[in-house]
Amino acid sequence: MPVPALIPIAREPGYRTDTIGRFAEGQFYAVIHGAHRDDDEELDLRRERIRWYAYLHRFDHAGNHVRSEISLIGVAPYVRGEFRRRAEQRLRELLDDLVDRDYGDIAIRPFRVLYDGVTFGLIDESDAERDAWAELYPDRLGFTEPWDGTYST
């Protein structure tokens, strides 16, 4: 079975997909996550080059990517203390712009956005080894059969 046109993502309260759902204009996926730039291939055992972002992807009701609002919070090994407060505040600001926001499962189409040298998106990475597979970046959530919204990390 190939990757479906619409890929379900199940909301998991209190975990990685906690802040996803629907709003008046469509669907959304919002999160705080860290990533290295795509061209950063050097080992980073101390996590000194992790770039932390608060971001919101907006989709229409049919699951088409409309736009992404991405904010670099800073570079640090972990998102803690005042740094975490700033990231959470930015995420709240992004979410507060969504009229009639309701948290829940979503179903979206693959998309790709490059921001600050980092790939964001839901990308079809099907191959002979994994068969049909879609990966959410930079979150590194993998989706596959039975296409019920659950993911692998």
Image (cartoon, rainbow, N blue to C red):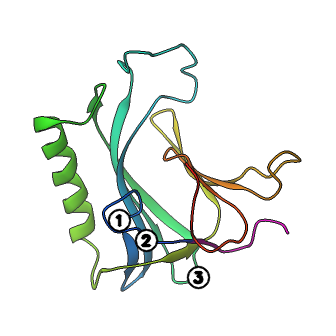
Left or right, 37 with respect to 131, comes to: left
Measure how far apart labels 1 and 3 are at the Cα level. 21 Å
From the viewer's perspective, is residue 31 above or below residue 84? below
Q: Is mark 2 in CB contact (under 8 Å) with mark 1? A: yes
Q: Nearer the viewer, mark 2 or mark 3?
A: 2
Q: Earlier in the sequence, mark 2 or mark 3?
A: 2
> In the drawing, does residue 64 fall left or right of residue 127?
left
How far across and down, in percent of the image, does residue 84 sit? 18, 42
Q: What amino acid is at disc 3?
A: Ala
Spot the residue most to the right: 128
Magenta stretch: give its range.
1-8
Residue at figure coordinates x 56%, y 30% from the top left = 38
Q: Earlier in the sequence, mark 1 or mark 3?
A: 1
Q: Main secondary structure of the magenta part?
A: loop
Where is residue 116 drawn, in percent x and y? 44, 35
Disc 3: which residue: 62
- Name the residue beneath numbered marker 1: 18
Which one is in front, 44 or 100?
44
The answer to whether the residues at label 1 and label 3 have Cβ atoms under 8 Å apart is: no
Residues at marks 2 and 3 touching, judged by CB atoms closer than 8 Å: no
Q: Is residue 133 magenta?
A: no
Q: Distance of mark 2 from mark 1, alpha carbons?
A: 6 Å
Q: Indicate the secondary structure of the residue bearing disc 1.
A: loop
Badge 1: residue crowd in 10 Å (few <14, some 14–19, many ≥20) = some
The amino acid at mark 2 is Arg
The amino acid type found where label 1 is placed reads: Asp
Query: Where is mark 2, residue-wise?
Result: 11
**116 vs 151, nearest the viewer:** 151
Q: Residue at x 89, y 47 (%)?
A: 128
- At a point 29% along the width and 75% down the height, the residue shown is 98
How many residues crowd mark 3 within 10 Å: few (<14), some (14–19), many (20+)?
Answer: few
